[in-house]
Amino acid sequence: MTDLDISEVAHRAGVPASTLRFYEEKGLIAPIGRRGLRRQYDPGVLERLALIALGRTAGFSLEEIARMFAPDGQPRIDRQVLVSKAEELDRTIRELGVLRDSLRHAAACPAPSHMECSTFRRLLKAAASGGVAVPPRHRPRTGPGL
């Protein structure tokens, strides 16, 4: 396979070119040169971008993902880090399941008012004490295309 320019990489990876430039700034990817003003990449960058996308989907920060690559650019993923992230996801899934079930109950509750529903009141109490999970999509993200 021949070298790919930035627009081809962006198209194939499904990310804007600005995200590729941002990943470059963060040291996650590197072009192999330029053809005119256009950055050129080794085709292997597509696999690296797929690993970055998978890491982002799993909730890893860009800094955590950067540590998953050896100095030579090859993946070096600590299995214990993966186990820890899986356990974190399990906790989030459990918390979100409780939240979902509570909201469904509140929606169908026969109490005259949500404030008279004991299940809804427990949900409010948990939210007041920080015991309700915030879905990952509500956490602040930084950088283009993130």
Image: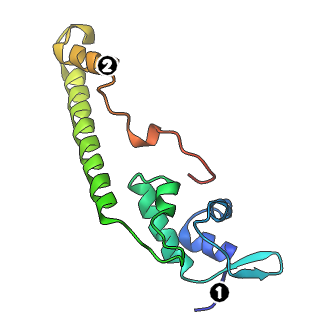
Q: Position of residue 50 (x, y in %)?
A: 47, 70
Viewer-nearest residue: 69 or 88: 69
Q: Residue at x 68, y 81 (%)?
A: 32
Q: Are marks 2 and 1 in contact (CB under 8 Å)?
A: no
Outermost front residue: 71
- The figure's colour scheme reads rainbow
Viewer-nearest residue: 105 or 22: 22
Quadrant of res 100: top left
Q: Which badge, 2 or 1, comes first in the chain's sequence?
A: 1
Outermost right residue: 36
> In the structure shown, which secondary structural element does the residue marked by tag 1 occupy?
loop
Report crowding for label 1: few under 14, some 14 to 19, many 20 or more residues within 10 A (C-alpha): some
Q: Position of residue 108 (x, y in %)?
A: 20, 23
Q: Residue at x 23, y 13 (%)?
A: 121
Outermost bottom residue: 1
Q: Residue at x 64, y 73 (%)?
A: 30
Q: Position of residue 53 (x, y in %)?
A: 47, 62
Q: Quadrant of the N terminus?
A: bottom right
* Kind of residue at badge 2: Ser
* Kind of residue at badge 1: Asp
Q: Which mark is residue 3?
A: 1
Q: Position of residue 25 (x, y in %)?
A: 67, 61
Q: Nearer the viewer, mark 2 or mark 1?
A: 2
Q: Which mark is residue 107?
A: none
Left or right, residue 55 beside residue 7: left
Report crowding for label 2: few under 14, some 14 to 19, many 20 or more residues within 10 A (C-alpha): few
What is the tally of numbered marks visible in this picture? 2
Judging by the rendered image, the residue that carries numbered circle 2 is: 129
Quadrant of res 105: top left
> In the structure shown, which secondary structural element does the residue marked by tag 2 occupy?
loop
Q: CA distance from mark 2 to mark 1?
A: 54 Å
